[in-house]
Image (tube, rainbow, N blue to C red):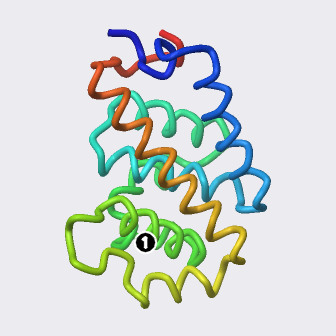
Amino acid sequence: MPNPAIVAGPDVIPALLGVAGAVKNTGIPETTVNLVYLRVSQINGSSWNVHKHAGDLKEAGESAERISTVAAWRETPFFTPEERAALALAEAATRLSDRHDPVSDEVWAEAAKYFSDQQLAGLLLATGLSNLWHRLIPTTRQPAGPVGG
């Protein structure tokens, strides 16, 4: 089946792109948002999205060292404290069923040290949007490869 966001009708893709645009307007550094998209894609096992977001980071000039270690960000020195806080929040908000209190006060407080309320909302929207795509794309077996291909 083609991507459900396309099949459902002409209003779906613009709405989802509108959410992505709103995330950009929160002032979160684009690299941070792309790291979040990549990490959430890795957690969900969405090859299409991992391929896309790794490519976006590469195109933006990110090093192979950083891109290749996003999944192990806790054990590497390649990420800023702000990026670490964003990645921790995104992981917690993605792995909701892993614990009774998925986004702990500690994770939230660390993110709040670096991001405004508007930016925290943007991080949660980016995480939620990424998770939505991961329910559509792998379910309908969209292969990794060039965007649109």
- The answer to which of 61 and 124 lies nearer the viewer is 124
Residue that carries the numbered disc 1 in the rendered image = 88
Q: Residue at x 46, y 71 (%)?
A: 89
Of the 4 image quadrants, the one containing the N terminus is: top left
Which one is in front, 96 or 141? 96
Q: Relative to residue 2, is residue 122 depicted above or below?
A: below
Compared to 37, does 1 lie above or below? above
- Looking at the picture, which amino acid does disc 1 mark? Ala
Dot 1: element: helix
Does residue 121 appear left or right of residue 28 in this picture? Answer: left
Q: Nearer the viewer, residue 100 or 88?
A: 100
Q: Quadrant of residue 105?
A: bottom left
Residue 58: percent from left, percent from top = 58, 39
Q: Residue at x 65, y 33 (%)?
A: 15
Residue drawn at point x = 61 percent, y = 83 percent: 112
Q: Give how far across and how far down residue 110 sits, in percent.
A: 52, 86
In the picture, measured across the screen, residue 147 lies left or right of residue 10, that is left
Local crowd at mark 1 within 10 Å, few (<14), some, or many (≥20)?
many
Count of marks placed on residues: 1
| Percent of width and height locating residue 142 | 34, 18
Query: Residue shown at 29%/62% (left/top)?
Result: 95
Residue 10, given in percent of the width and then of the height, sits at: 62, 15
Figure quadrant of residue 32: bottom right
Side of 121 relative to 140 (left or right): right
